[in-house]
Image (cartoon, grey):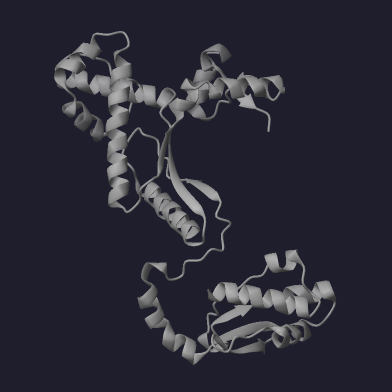
């Protein structure tokens, strides 16, 4: 409410002084002064304008202060300070009435229709479904959920999306790792994948698998697919529960695999190839281990698909 009042008021002051342009109001900065004696809000707008309009910054600030349409029910004063800052002070009556207004409006207090009422999709967290969430995911969840709520509170139709990376080598390796842990559980010798997932959570997952179905999957050529799917579903369920306990719920859980099944990935790649922006090259080698592998030749290292950007 106050932010909009200040922004609208300074926009009007710029118009009254012949200084208004959309660019100038767009880069308006408002801040709460560190020193309360300087007021409740401040802006350096005049300092930024002075060079453009070739006038002393304090003179610009004085002109803006005089033209600012001050609502005495909200602001007691608009003061020019220092080299050209504008400081705004709340009216005592405004502050005295604020607690009862907050209590009366409840959860609606502070909400506005400033937004365009457009649809906004905020994708955040999107941790790989190959293990438990960690503290970095918690930070992303806090920032993302707050952003969704702020957008909603300012009139946008905002929704959060968790993008599930359920395709590719990493999830296949997850399936192989769970298969090996399940085999270990029932006493069947099976080599653990060299780059497999070592976390104790895989033993927990293996212990929870239905034994008959697991034994049947071990004997099939495509058995790792069953273990991969079991691992994905169970780990995603854990991630959902952890996020819900943390106060974060997503409107959309979007799976990468749906893009592949629909043909969208192949179609997009084909279009990019038609435009000549796709090329294939050997993945660059880095580090001592990669230097050892480099001797095996490019064929063993494999090519990757790259996009010219």
Does any portion of residue 198 appear in the rendered image?
Answer: no
- 92 versus 157 height, above or below: below
Foreground pick, 232 / 19: 19
Image side of residue 248 versus residue 256, left or right:
left
Image side of residue 10 versus residue 159, left or right:
right
Q: Position of residue 41 (x, y in %)?
A: 57, 80
Foreground pick, 178 / 212: 212
- 141 versus 113 height, above or below: above
Q: How many marks?
A: 0
Q: Position of residue 10 (x, y in %)?
A: 68, 77
Image side of residue 218 versus residue 274, left or right:
left
**Residue name at image x 53 percent, y 17 percent:** 301
Q: Position of residue 282 (x, y in %)?
A: 60, 20
Does any portion of residue 8 appear in the rendered image?
Answer: yes
Q: Please state, as top left, top right, bottom left or bottom right, where the C terminus lies in the image.
A: top right
Residue 168 sits in which quadrant?
A: top left
Foreground pick, 59 / 280: 59
**Residue name at image x 82 percent, y 71 percent:** 52
Residue 117 sits in which quadrant?
A: bottom right
Q: Position of residue 227 (x, y in %)?
A: 28, 21
- 169 versus 25 height, above or below: above
Residue 142 sits in which quadrant?
A: bottom left
């Amino acid at each position: 409410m106050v932010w909009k009042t200040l922004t609208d008021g300074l926009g009007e002051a710029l118009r009254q002084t012949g200084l208004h342009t959309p660019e100038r109001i767009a880069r308006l900065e408002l801040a709460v002064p560190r020193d309360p004696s300087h007021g409740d809000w401040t802006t350096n707008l005049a300092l930024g304008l002075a060079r453009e309009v070739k006038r002393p910054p304090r003179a610009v600030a004085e002109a803006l202060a005089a033209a600012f349409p001050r609502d005495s029910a909200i602001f007691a004063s608009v003061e020019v300070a220092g080299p050209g800052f504008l400081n705004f002070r709340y009216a005592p009556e405004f502050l005295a009435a604020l607690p009862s207004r907050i209590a009366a409006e409840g959860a609606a207090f502070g909400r506005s229709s400033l937004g365009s009422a457009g649809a906004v999709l905020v994708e955040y967290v999107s941790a790989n479904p190959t293990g438990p969430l960690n503290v970095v995911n918690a930070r992303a969840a806090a920032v993302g959920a707050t952003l969704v709520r702020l957008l909603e509170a300012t009139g946008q139709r905002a929704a959060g999306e968790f993008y599930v990376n359920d395709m590719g080598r990493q999830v296949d390796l997850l399936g192989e790792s769970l298969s090996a842990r399940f085999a270990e559980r029932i006493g069947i010798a099976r080599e653990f994948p060299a780059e497999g997932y070592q976390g104790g959570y895989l033993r927990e997952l293996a212990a929870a698998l239905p034994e008959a179905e697991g034994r049947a999957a071990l004997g099939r050529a495509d058995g790792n697919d069953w273990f991969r799917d079991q691992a994905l579903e169970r780990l995603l369920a854990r991630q959902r529960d952890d996020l819900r306990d943390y106060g974060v719920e997503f409107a959309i859980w979007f799976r990468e695999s749906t893009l592949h099944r629909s043909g969208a990935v192949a179609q997009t790649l084909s279009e990019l190839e038609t435009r000549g922006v796709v090329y294939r090259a050997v993945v660059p080698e880095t580090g001592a281990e990669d230097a050892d592998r480099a001797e095996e030749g490019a064929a063993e290292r494999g090519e990757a698909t790259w996009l010219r950007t």
